[in-house]
């Protein structure tokens, strides 16, 4: 089934100079393996076509089941000289959430809430 | 003697304009051992350097007097304060802190200054290689304003060992402020790369302040953060092996969850196996997070490899001015009128300004200002749009005049309103690497 990445994961984006990075963290660890196969550098490059001028690299953080995309020449010169309205690219992770992915059969959406006894996040 | 088997380190500031109210809550209620204040983003130092050029006693963080008034009394009662609020002038900042402490009757408060990050003379004499342009320093257009090497935890540790209760420096790397406190508390060896790597993980989780307590995170209904209107700052309880629990005051808003910690772990990193700092090359790949109670997340598994042989230097270059102006359109036909206004501005730019400008950009805010060519087409014409023109130019008069061009669109397509104009200095930041031994951090004790 097709779902938007937004249903599966959250993102956080930031900047260092003219390089942007977008961390992608699935809400559930069990979604990491299939997400890794689908969320390739090519998929991300499609989403940012025309916006990112340099190469895109992907890294894994297996300890927290997260991916990190690093986008070079991505911020029109970086926050100190870019004319972009959002010169940090703070919103860029949100653009990535619009990508469509193919979830396994029987996959169900998950909106976490925090259990106030344990501090753990549970499915609502 | 240690009073606990962990050190509790709070974080009071994530950048130069951060709100200090939650920091004071932490100082008052947090039972902290130390409170760190990061104040420097990439261009903050170059802006501070320009203030110093205008007044040699200036160039430190604009909040320094507030910091002194609100937090030195806690330092006098045992709270260690570590900050890079000295910005472009740590020595003057130290003298000011000394004077403000005296005014509060805190004559014996040990205040140390870490200096030596200013390497402007060094990078100019060596004509260092600038990574972004792939050429030496002299090829940069514009005046070089500042050059600061990232210092690590070691000079801060030295100051703490010599008895400092307050340590203020310039370009000390953000997470190194925290690493210094834990290294000193537990006496970690300078070549204990495993603990240093884990310590940098903890410093990185704290360095953006309320990012780890639910800031920059809420996205209802997917992520509902409680108390976003009274967001608190975090602390870490760090054990002797570096494993830490990230937490916050129970009465503060926001929350600390496995996901808020993960979100900050991935923030502004490149290769997670090689996170470069002056202290260690930290490895985030095996870091794990586990909720161990409400607003308590245990973080462990960070490690590292030996510190790099070079230090990163940020070089600030005065490239003139950036001008920005906007005008808004609303109601039926707003999109078409905004597009027409955009065409008029583009035409006038091409005819009158192009040769005087280095760069230009036209946006429709509400349509494509953030994602540019990657923005999806609007499903329906937006009801409100703002046209934004931005240029970069070395000429201040050109910058001012082009913002008037947008204002003159009051006489353009019908109903244009709400003009805002702004001209700012264009301080570009470039980076270089210099050998570690070309930088000499020093601890000094202001009179």
Image: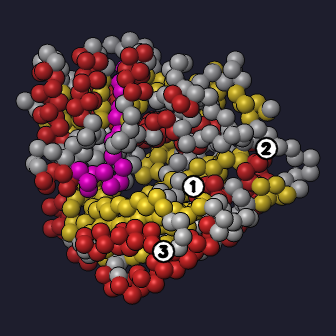
The residue beneath circle 1 is: A91
Q: Are marks 1 and 3 in contact (CB under 8 Å)?
A: no
Residue B225 horizontal/vertical position (percent): 63, 33
Q: Nearer the viewer, mark 2 or mark 3?
A: 3
Give the answer, above or below, for where B204 lies relative to B144.
above
Residue A49 horizontal/vertical position (percent): 63, 72
Picture quarter with the N terminus of chain B: top left
Q: Quadrant of the rendered structure where residue B102 is? A: top left
> Which is nearer the eye, B218 or B72?
B218
Q: Earlier in the sequence, mark 1 or mark 2?
A: 2
User: SS for tag 3?
Assistant: loop
Residue B364 horizontal/vertical position (percent): 55, 67
Would residue B116 be found to the left or right of residue B381 on screen? Answer: left
Q: Chain of mark 3?
A: B
Residue located 24% across and 35% down the image = B64
Q: Which residues are magenta?
A: B33-48
The residue beneath circle 2 is: A30
Would residue B319 be found to the left or right of residue B208 on screen? Answer: left
* Mark 1 Cα-neighbour bin, 10 Å: few <14, some 14–19, many ≥20: some
Residue located 25% across and 66% down the image = B318
Q: Are marks 1 and 2 on the same chain?
A: yes
Q: Quadrant of the rendered structure where residue B207 is? A: top left
Q: Are marks 1 and 3 on the same chain?
A: no
Q: Chain of mark 1?
A: A
> Which is nearer the eye, B35 or B238?
B35
Q: Nearer the viewer, mark 1 or mark 3?
A: 3
Circle count: 3
Q: Residue furthest bottom?
A: B351
Give the answer, above or below, for where B183 lies relative to A12.
above
* Mark 3 Cα-neighbour bin, 10 Å: few <14, some 14–19, many ≥20: some
Q: Is residue B439 magenta?
A: no
């Amino acid at each position: 089934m097709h779902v938007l990445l937004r249903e599966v994961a959250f993102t956080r984006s930031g900047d260092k100079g003219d390089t942007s990075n977008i961390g992608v963290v699935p809400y559930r660890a069990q979604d990491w393996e299939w997400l890794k196969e689908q969320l390739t550098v090519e998929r991300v490059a499609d989403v940012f076509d025309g916006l990112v001028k340099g190469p895109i690299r992907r890294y894994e953080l297996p300890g927290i089941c997260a991916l990190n995309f690093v986008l070079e020449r991505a911020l029109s010169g970086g926050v100190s000289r870019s004319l972009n309205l959002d010169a940090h690219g703070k919103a860029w992770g949100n653009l990535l959430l619009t990508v469509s992915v193919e979830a396994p059969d029987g996959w169900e959406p998950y909106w976490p809430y925090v259990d106030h006894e344990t501090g753990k996040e549970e499915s609502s | 003697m240690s009073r606990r088997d962990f050190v509790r380190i709070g974080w009071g500031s994530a950048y130069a304009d951060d709100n200090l109210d939650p920091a004071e809550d932490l100082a008052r209620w947090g039972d902290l051992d130390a409170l760190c204040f990061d104040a420097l983003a990439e261009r903050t130092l170059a802006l501070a350097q320009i203030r110093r050029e205008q007044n040699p006693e200036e160039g430190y963080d604009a909040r320094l007097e507030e910091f002194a008034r609100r937090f030195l009394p806690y330092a006098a009662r045992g709270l260690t304060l570590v900050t890079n609020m000295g910005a472009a002038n740590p020595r003057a900042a130290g003298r000011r802190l000394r004077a403000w402490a005296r005014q509060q009757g805190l004559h014996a408060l040990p205040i140390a200054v870490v200096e030596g990050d200013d390497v402007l003379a060094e990078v100019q004499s060596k004509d260092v290689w600038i990574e972004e342009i792939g050429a030496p320093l002299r090829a940069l257009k514009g005046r070089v304003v500042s050059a600061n090497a990232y210092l690590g935890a070691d000079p801060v540790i030295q100051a703490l060992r010599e008895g400092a209760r307050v340590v203020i420096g310039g370009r000390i790397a953000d997470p190194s402020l925290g690493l210094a406190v834990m290294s000193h508390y537990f006496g970690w060896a300078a070549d204990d790369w495993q603990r240093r790597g884990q310590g940098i993980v903890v410093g990185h989780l704290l360095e953006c302040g309320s990012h780890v307590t639910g800031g920059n995170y809420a996205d209802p209904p997917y992520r509902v953060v409680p108390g976003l209107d009274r967001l608190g700052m975090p602390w870490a309880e760090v054990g002797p092996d570096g494993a830490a629990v990230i937490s916050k005051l129970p009465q503060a808003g926001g929350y600390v969850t496995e996901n808020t910690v993960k979100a900050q772990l991935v923030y502004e990193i490149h290769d997670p196996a090689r996170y470069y700092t002056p202290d260690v090359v930290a490895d985030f790949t095996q870091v794990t997070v586990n909720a161990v109670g409400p607003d308590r997340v245990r973080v462990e598994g960070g490690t590292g490899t030996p510190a790099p042989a070079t230090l990163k230097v940020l070089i600030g270059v005065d490239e003139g001015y950036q001008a920005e102006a906007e005008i808004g359109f609303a109601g039926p036909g707003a999109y078409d009128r905004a597009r027409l206004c955009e065409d008029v501005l583009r035409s006038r730019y091409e005819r009158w300004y192009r040769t005087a400008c280095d760069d230009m950009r036209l946006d429709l805010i509400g349509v494509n200002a953030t994602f540019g060519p990657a923005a999806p087409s609007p499903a329906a014409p937006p009801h409100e749009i703002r046209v934004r023109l931005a240029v970069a130019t070395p000429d201040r008069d050109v910058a001012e005049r082009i913002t008037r061009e947008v204002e003159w669109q009051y006489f353009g397509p019908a109903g244009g309103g709400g003009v805002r104009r702004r001209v700012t200095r264009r301080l570009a930041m470039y980076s270089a690497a210099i050998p570690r031994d070309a930088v000499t951090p020093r601890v000094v004790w202001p009179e």
